[in-house]
Amino acid sequence: MGIRVSDVAFVRFQAPDLDQMEAFLTDFGLVRAEKTDDTLYMRGAGDEPFVHVTHKGAAGFAGIAFLADSVSDLEALAAMEGASPVEEITEPGGGKRVRFVDPNGHKVEVVAGRESVGALDLQRGAATNCAMQQPRVDKTLRSGEGPAQVMRLGHCVLNVVDFRQSEAWYKERFGLITSDEIEIEKGTSIGAFMRCDRGSLPADHHTLFLLGTGEAGFNHAAFEVANVDDLMAGNSHLAAKGYTHEWGVGRHILGSQVFDYWRDPWGHTVEHWTDGDVFTSDTPANTQGIDTLLGVQWGPPPPPTLGS
Ligand SMILES: [Fe+2]
């Protein structure tokens, strides 16, 4: 029987040069957790041991991991068709995991019992004044230069061969629920924003988006930063370093996040986001059109390269 995962935990990539990946990810706002001859583990400012892994090899996406509440949840998953046994994780933070391969060949892990490593201090956590309220009194705000501060991995978008088949596969195992489904025409859906079912606890509007493109692939991974000020400081920092900017800064319609999309040195799209919607399990699913998917509340329109 399936479980209800509570979040996404980390993404794995392969790249031929770990030093080059570390330099980019440091400018993107991650912090080295551990580096060996063949693997780089990067953490955010949150308390998880790592949120981004790079294995040395030919460049490409190498998998996604979700977070389960308990090892007994992992045991339930391990009894499902296609699951690995429950395994010890021999990586920073330890814990246990179950591995799957989805119908598209994407590697999927579910982890539990990882050690908390404690949160890092925030550089840009100052209260924000606005016209309606001024919580910051007798204090200045100084953003300072330097990278944004990634807190955690927030969501991942995967291109899949058959949206309905993949949707069923993920929902059966991990208990994901739909926030917004995307129709290209009446009765024909090409994808959906899905979130974790945390009952009365709020969950991000989307943790996984499956986009039925007819071909399996990686679309993007999105990391939550401290706040809008932090996101804009990060944008300036990455631009000054000459990295490839893809889309932003803007505010999405579905999920409402302020977003900023960049490319890593091998072309993988990685997003900074902040100020997104959070829903309990009470919010029902909606159906939306492709214009709403790609539309913005403010900011530039999406580039034709998005997700390629
Ligand atoms: Fe995103």
Image (cartoon, rainbow, N blue to C red):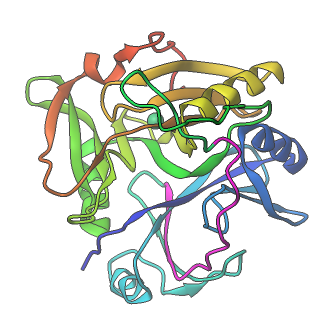
Q: Nearer the viewer, residue 201 or 128?
A: 128
Identify the image quadrant of the C terminus.
top right
Residue 91 position within the rendered picture, expressed as x and y whole percent measured from the top left: 71, 75
Identify the image quadrant of the N terminus.
bottom left
Q: Nearer the viewer, residue 276 or 130?
A: 130
Up the image or down, 270 lies above or below 295; here it is below
Q: How many marks?
A: 0
Residue 9 position within the rendered picture, expressed as x and y whole percent measured from the top left: 52, 62
Quadrant of the rendered image containing residue 169: bottom left
Up the image or down, 304 lies above or below 20; here it is above
Please report the residue visible at 71 percent of the width from the left and 45 percent of the height from the top. Answer: 123
Q: 181 left or right of 220?
A: left
Please report the residue visible at 67 percent of the width from the left and 44 percent of the height from the top. Answer: 149
**Stretch of the chain drawn in magenta:** 106-124
Majority secondary structure in the magenta region: loop
- Check the image and name the residue furthest to the top: 300
Residue 42 position within the rendered picture, expressed as x and y whole percent measured from the top left: 73, 57
Please report the residue visible at 36 percent of the width from the left and 80 percent of the height from the top. Answer: 77
- Check the image and name the residue furthest to the front: 138
Q: 83 left or right of 171?
A: right
